[in-house]
Image (tube, grey):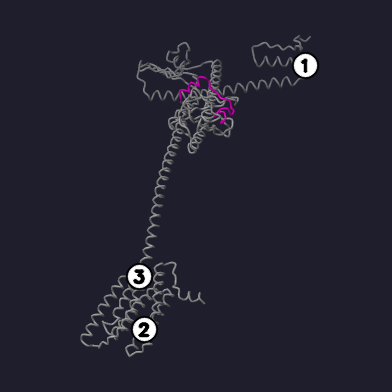
């Protein structure tokens, strides 16, 4: 029962709107207190008994109670502003009516008009409070005017009744003042709480902003540093990609890595042929160069950082060489404080290591290690490419040398076999060339393999070259003495020499093929004749006869000997 009553009297709550909840609570309190007070006033007035005016006032009070009941219903349905307007308007109208029918401006009801003014300010706002204040002032002047012109006759109440009514009015005004002050205090407390929370939030935001700025600055610095590192890696990669000689590539790598990353010492170790030692092949530092001159090498074991990296195929880092158990003091590099060795891998095979040393402790962060690992992969690929290029170049040079030697031998043999090695056109006819009349320009071109031409000369000699070998000379002589040879003439002669070289080579190949075919036919004929007889003496006779006929102008003998070298009998 008690819970039901408390729930019935409790004001509604609107979680989504604190202002509506506050107004509903005030309306609920005013409504129930007003009903309670008005009921008490009615009881007192009915006990007193009354004249007509008293009856009319009682009816007004009953009407006000009814209106307040409607207001309480509206606030529970969520119509807070309508309920507030209903309460303030009804209270003002009711008090105005009581003032008119009672003692006018001298009646207690006129002083009670302060109640709807305060209610308007408390529930509706400043504008509504000013409106009802002006309406009350106008009502007072209207009452004064009506009383002055005797539009109604005042019936002054007794002092006891006046004190009674003023007590009720002051009680309502005090209650409203209490509600107003409480509302202001609650608003102030909420404002102070909000201010404290806002101050705390501002401090947290300020701390967060400072922390965020520091993190952004740190991250920006890291990204800038990382971008600079990758730019350095890209610069090193572009440079080493253009170097194909291994002996020139290795020192270039150490110098570039040292310059781009500001390292004290950079060394490149490559494995020997047996894969037992890592040999220092290049370095940027003076100590490293002295170590190269001393043929510095390290075994592939865990007793050195480089040996550990090459034997295990994984990076080895000494952030503080003074406390690292693997690092050993190298007198050639006394300023080393931290060191890292990264294996150089190609197709899953370790070919060496790149050794980087710094004069600072803890010089290698995880980002620096990642960048150096990327750099090590590129260096390994560049070294392998340079090695393969060197091998291919050597193989190409060997093949070219062998082919040139073969070409020279073949042409030497071919020249010996031909009857007339050259011809000359004298302007009228083509005649065989006299070898003893070969001019100096042609001799020089044949020996050097280069164009023989002076500024002004009566002749020009152009070598006929085939795959780097001079196989002949195209000699042109002016019949009018010395002349200035034009570039178009030289270009024409060089093109003719080039075509002649190809044609001569084709002719040599054809003739060589024909000789080989004739030789094969002769061998086939001899084999057929020998294979046609089965008697030993007939075979010997057929062999010497056919060989003598094929070779020509020779005497051929064939004798069988025993295994110990003695002639048969």
Q: Residue 560's spot in the image, x, y percent?
A: 75, 12
Q: Report crowding for label 1: few under 14, some 14 to 19, many 20 or more residues within 10 A (C-alpha).
A: few
Q: Report crowding for label 2: few under 14, some 14 to 19, many 20 or more residues within 10 A (C-alpha).
A: many
State the residue at coordinates (39%, 82%).
40
Q: Is residue 174 above or below residue 427?
A: below
Identify which residue, 511 or 246, lies in the foreground: 246
CA–CA distance between discs 1 and 2? 165 Å
Farthest-out residue, bottom: 51
Question: Which element carries disc 2, helix, strand or loop?
Answer: helix
Q: Please give the range of residues in magenta.
A: 285-309
Identify which residue, 527 or 365, lies in the foreground: 365
Question: Which element carries disc 1, helix, strand or loop?
Answer: helix
Residue matched to label 2: 61
Q: Residue 321's spot in the image, x, y percent?
A: 51, 30
Query: Which quadrant holds residue 427?
Result: top left
Identify which residue, 433 or 474, lies in the foreground: 474
Q: Is residue 234 above or below residue 434?
A: below
Query: Which quadrant holds residue 541?
Result: top right
Whether the magenta-drawn stretch holds residue 186 is answered as no
Whether the magenta-drawn stretch holds residue 300 is answered as yes
Question: Which element carries disc 3, helix, strand or loop?
Answer: helix
Identify which residue, 71 or 169, lies in the foreground: 169
Q: Earlier along the polypeptide chain: callout 3 or callout 2?
A: 2
Instruction: Please indicate whether residue 137 sits to the left or right of residue 406 in the image.
Output: left
Rendered image: mark on residue 536? 1
Q: Earlier along the polypeptide chain: callout 3 or callout 1?
A: 3
Q: Residue 103's spot in the image, x, y percent?
A: 27, 85
Residue matched to label 3: 180
Q: Earlier along the polypeptide chain: callout 1 or callout 2?
A: 2
State the residue at coordinates (45%, 11%).
437
CA–CA distance between discs 3 and 1? 151 Å
């Amino acid at each position: 029962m008690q819970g039901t009553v408390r729930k019935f009297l409790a004001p509604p709550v609107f979680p989504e709107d604190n202002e509506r909840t506050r107004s509903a609570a005030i309306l609920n309190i005013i409504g129930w207190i007003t009903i309670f007070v008005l009921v008490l006033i009615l009881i007192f007035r009915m006990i007193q008994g009354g004249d007509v005016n008293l009856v009319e006032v009682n009816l007004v009070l009953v009407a006000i109670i009814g209106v307040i009941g409607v207001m309480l219903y509206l606030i529970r349905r969520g119509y807070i502003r309508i309920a507030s307007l209903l309460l303030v308007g009804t209270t003002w109208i009711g008090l105005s009516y009581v003032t008119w029918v009672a003692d006018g401006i001298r009646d207690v009801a006129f002083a009670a008009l302060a109640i709807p003014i305060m209610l308007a300010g408390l529930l509706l706002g400043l504008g509504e409070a000013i409106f009802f204040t002006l309406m009350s002032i106008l009502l007072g002047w209207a009452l004064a005017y009506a009383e002055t012109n005797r539009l109604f006759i005042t019936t002054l109440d007794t002092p006891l009744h006046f004190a009674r009514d003023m007590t009720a009015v002051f009680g309502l005004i005090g209650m409203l003042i209490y509600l107003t002050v409480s509302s202001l205090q609650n608003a102030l407390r909420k404002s102070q709480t909000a201010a404290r929370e806002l101050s705390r939030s501002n401090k947290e935001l300020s701390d967060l902003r400072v922390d965020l700025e520091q993190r952004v600055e740190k991250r920006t610095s890291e990204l800038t540093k990382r971008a600079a590192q990758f730019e350095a890696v890209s610069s090193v990669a572009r440079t080493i990609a253009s170097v194909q000689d291994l002996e020139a590539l290795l020192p270039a790598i150490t110098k570039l890595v040292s310059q781009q990353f500001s390292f004290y010492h950079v060394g490149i170790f490559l494995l020997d042929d047996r894969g037992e030692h890592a040999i220092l092949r290049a370095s940027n530092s003076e100590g490293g160069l002295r170590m190269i001159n001393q043929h510095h090498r390290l075994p592939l074991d865990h007793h050195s950082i480089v040996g550990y990296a090459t034997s295990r195929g994984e990076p080895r880092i000494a952030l503080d060489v003074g406390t690292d158990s693997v690092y050993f003091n190298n007198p050639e590099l006394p300023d080393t404080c931290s060191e890292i060795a990264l294996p150089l891998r190609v197709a899953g095979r370790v070919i060496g290591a790149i050794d980087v040393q710094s004069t600072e402790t803890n010089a290698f962060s995880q980002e620096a290690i990642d960048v150096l690992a990327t750099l090590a992969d590129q260096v390994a690929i560049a070294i392998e490419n340079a090695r393969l290029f060197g091998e291919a170049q050597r193989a190409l040079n060997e093949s070219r040398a062998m082919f040139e030697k073969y070409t020279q031998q073949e042409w030497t043999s071919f020249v010996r076999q031909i009857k007339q090695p050259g011809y000359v056109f004298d302007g009228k006819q083509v005649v065989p060339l006299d070898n003893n009349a070969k001019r100096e320009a042609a001799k020089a071109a044949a020996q050097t393999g280069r164009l023989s031409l002076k500024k002004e000369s009566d002749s020009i000699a152009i070598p006929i070259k085939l795959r780097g070998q001079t196989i002949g000379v195209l000699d042109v002589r002016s019949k009018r003495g010395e002349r200035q040879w034009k570039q178009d003439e030289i270009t024409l002669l060089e093109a003719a020499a080039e075509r002649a070289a190809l044609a001569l080579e084709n002719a040599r190949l054809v003739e060589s093929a024909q000789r080989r075919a004739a030789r094969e036919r002769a061998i086939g004929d001899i084999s057929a004749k020998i294979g046609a007889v089965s008697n030993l003496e007939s075979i010997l006779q057929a062999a010497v006869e056919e060989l003598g006929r094929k070779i020509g102008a020779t005497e051929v003998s064939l004798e069988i000997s025993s295994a110990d070298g003695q002639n048969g009998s």
